[in-house]
Amino acid sequence: MQPAATTTAPAAAGKGTGRQYEDFTDLLREGSKELGQAELLIANHFTLQDAVQAISIMDPRMDTGVNVPNADRGHLAVAGIADKTEWSLAEITAICDQLIAREMSWLSGQLVAQTVFTCIYMHDIPMVSSTILRTFMQALIRHMALARAIIMKEQIYFEEDFWVDLASFSLDESAYGNHIERVYTTLISNVQAVIDSGAQDDKLLQAMDPYVVYGTDAQATLAMTNRLLDRLVFLQNATQLAQHMFMVDLDGIAQSIPKTRDALAAILKTPIEFNTDAAFDQLVNRKRFAQCPPCQASKFEAASELNAWMALLGHVETVATWPVTETAATIMETAERFTAKAQTTSILVKSFMHRIFVQDESLLGKTPMQLAVRDLILSTVSPPYSDDMGERIREIFDLIVSRCAEAFEVNLKLFCYNRARQRRRLVRVIENWELAQQELEAYDLELHETTAKTLGLVDEDEAQGCPYYFSSWIYTQKLSCLSLYYSMGFELELYSVNEYPMIFWYLNYLHANLADYVARIHAQRRSGVDRQPQSMSVSPTPGTLGAVDLKTRLVFMYQLETSKKLIDLGLLHITRALRAMGLLDIIDFGVYSESVHYQKRFKLMGMLASPTLLQVGEYLEFVHHSVSRVPEFVESATLAFQSAKQQLEVLLKGISQDDRGHDAFKEETQSLIKVCISNMLSARTFPWSSSPRPSETPSDTQMRIIANQRRVLFEFKYHPAYPVLVRSL
C-alpha cells in the first residue's frame, strides 16, 4: 500500500514557507488496519533508519529524552578539563592504551562518537594540562585523519564497515597548528632522555611534563616511562605507515610495518593496570550519536582491539607484497582466498587493497590493465591469430581485450568488499561475464571464419567447428564465480542443513563443467602454442608467468576442480543417505514446497544461457530413495572421497614447495585432503542403521523434521565450504 501524499496550497502572503500542509493522520490509521504482522507503512523519503530513531526504546544511548541518573556528568567533566592539573604516568599511559584500542574499534565499524570521543579529554584537547597526553591526542587526530582519507578516497565501504559521519567532531589536524609532527618528535626525544638518565634528573622529568606527579621510586618511574615510550613510538610509526599507505609507497610500508609491529608487541607485553573510568563516559555523546543510524555495538575490550591492530598490520603487509609476488594469472585467486581467511579485516585494509589492485589504470601498479589481461588471455588460450591478418582482425582483438579487461577489473575489485557484500555483488559480476561471453562468442566466430576462409591459417578439421578461444576463457571465469557464489553460502550460514543435498548436487555440476573447460583450453593451447605468432604476444614483464608456468597452473587447476567434483559427489551421497533415513527433509507446506525452494535457490542459474539449468525433477528423482539404499550411498561416498584424496595427493606432490605462485593451490589442497580423510572415517563410524525412517502422521513428521533441522550433522573444521560429517547423532 502506498502512503497518501500531502496536498499543498498557496498559503497566506508572507506566512511560513509558502505551503499549507494537510493532516492525514486519520488516513494513515485507516490504512494501517490492512497491515499484517511485521509490516510497516512508510513514506518513500522516510527510511527504516529514521523509523527506528523515531521509536522510543528507553535506551539512553539512543533516546536523548530519557532521564538517566547524573545525566550531565559528561558535560560537567568536559567543562572541568582545565581544572585537572595533576597526573600520573600510569594514568596517562593507560589512557593512551584506551585511545589506541578505541581507534581500532572505530575502524572496525563503530561510530566515532561511541569510541574515541567517549574520552572526555578529546572534547577540548588544548585545555588538557598534561603535555604528554595533549600531544598524544593531537597526534592521534592526525593518524585518524590519514586513515579516514584513505577510506574516503576509495569509497568502497558500507554502513556495516565504516560510518563516515563524525557527529560534528573534527579530525582537522590544522586546528592544532602545522607543527604536530615536530612537537611529537620533541616529546619522544624528551621521554627518551628521561630513560637514558634513569629517571633521576628532575629537570628532564619537568621538561617531559611539568604536570606529572613523579613518585620517589626512580625504578618504578623508569619502568612506566619505558611503557609510555612504547605507546608514543607505536603511534609515530603507525602514522608513518598510514602516510605510506596513502601514497602507495611500498618500500616505505615495508620499512614501517616491522617498527610498528615491534612497538605494538611491547604494548601487548606490558598492559597497564589503571582504572580509566574517570576519563571515559559512554553517554557523553548520546545526543550526537542518537541522530546516527543504529549500529550494533559490541562489548569493548581493549586487549582484543590491540590484538586487532596486530592482525591489521599483518594484513597490510600481505597486501603490500602483491605487486611483487602476484600477476594477472594469480591475483584473482590470491585475493579471494585472502578475503576468505581475513573476514574480520578492517575497512582500512580493504580500501588499501582497492588502491593496490588498480593504480593509474595499471594492474598492481605494474602493467596497464588491458595489456596485463591481453597477456593473460594470449598466454592461456594461445589463439592462432596475428596482427598482420588484417585491419578487422586487429579491431576485433582490441574489442575483445577491452571487454575482458573491463570484466576482469570489476571481478577483481569485488574482493575489496566484506564477505556478505561479495556474494551480493557476485550476481552482477556473473551477469557481466555472461554478457561478455555472448559478445565474445560472436567475435570468436567471426575471427574463425575470417582466418579459415580468407587466409587459410586454421586447420581443416578446425574449420568445421569454431574453437571459441576467447569465450572459453570467459566461460571459465564465469564458472569460477558461480561455484564461489554457491560455496560462500556455507561461510555466511545461508543454508539450512536440509538444503545441503541440492547445494552439493549443483556444486558437483559446476565443478565438473569447470574441469571440462579447463581441459578443453589446455588441449587447444597444446595444439596452438607452437604456431602462436610472436606479434600477438606481449613482451614478458618482470613477475609474469611464462608459458610453462601457465601450463602447469592449468594442470593444477584441472586436478583441483576434478577433486572438488569428487568431494561434492561424496557429500551428495552422504546427504542422500541421511535424507533416506529421514534426517534431511524440507517440510512441504503446500504453497511452499521443496520444488519452489529449489527454483528460488537457483534462480540465478535460470538467468544464464550457460551452463544449462538443472531441472528440479531430476534432482528430486536423484535424492528420493528408500532407507534400504543407505549402505549403497555410504559406499559410493567413501569411494568418491578415496578417489579425491588420491588425486589431491598427486597434486600436492606436483606443487613445488619453493614456488610462491602455487602457495594458494598447496594450502587449498592440504585442507581438502583433511576433509576427505575425516569424512571417510566418519562414514565408517556413523550409526547409519540406528534411525530408520518411521511411519508417522503428517503433523508428527513435520515436528520431527523441525527437530532434525536443529541437529548438528556437519561441522566445518578444515574448509569453509566443505563440511565434515559428525561421527554420532
Image: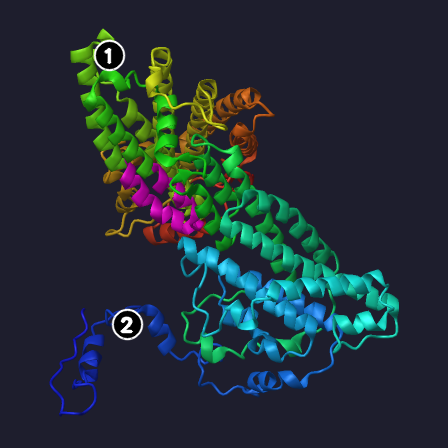
Question: What residue appears at the point 79 percent right and 77 percent down from the top-left corner?
Answer: 213
Q: Identity of the amino acid at label 2? A: Phe
Tell me if residue 592 comes above or below residue 302 in the rendering: above
User: Which is nearer the eye, 659 or 583?
Assistant: 659
Q: What x and y, as percent, mark residue 129?
A: 67, 79
Instruction: Give x and y (percent) for residue 514.
Output: 36, 27
The nearer-to-camera label among 1 and 2 is 1
In the image, residue 143 above or below residue 55: above
Inspect this view and state whether residue 519 appears: yes
The disc label shown at residue 46, or none = 2
- Lateral position of residue 705 relative to residue 682, left or right: left
Q: Is residue 422 magenta?
A: yes
Camera-side residue of 435 and 2? 435
Color scheme of the displayed model? rainbow
Q: Tell me, yes or no, whether the two marked residues, 1 and 2, touch with CB atoms within 8 Å.
A: no
Q: Which residues are magenta?
A: 408-433
User: Is residue 677 in the magenta section?
Assistant: no
Residue 464 appears anywhere in the view:
no
Coordinates of residue 498 in the picture (x, y in percent): 40, 45
Report the side of 114 relative to 433 (left or right). right
Quadrant housing residue 44: bottom left
Q: Where, quadrant-wise, is the N terminus in this rendering?
A: bottom left
Q: CA distance from mark 1 to mark 2?
A: 62 Å
Which residue position holds label 1?
Answer: 462
User: Residue drawn 22% across and 27% down?
Assistant: 395
Drawn side of residue 349 relative to residue 179, left or right:
left
Mark carried by residue 352 = none
- Assign a secondary structure to mark 2: loop
Q: Amino acid at mark 1?
A: Glu
Q: Looking at the image, is 163 positioned above or below residue 84?
A: above
- Which label's residue is closer to the chain start, 1 or 2? 2
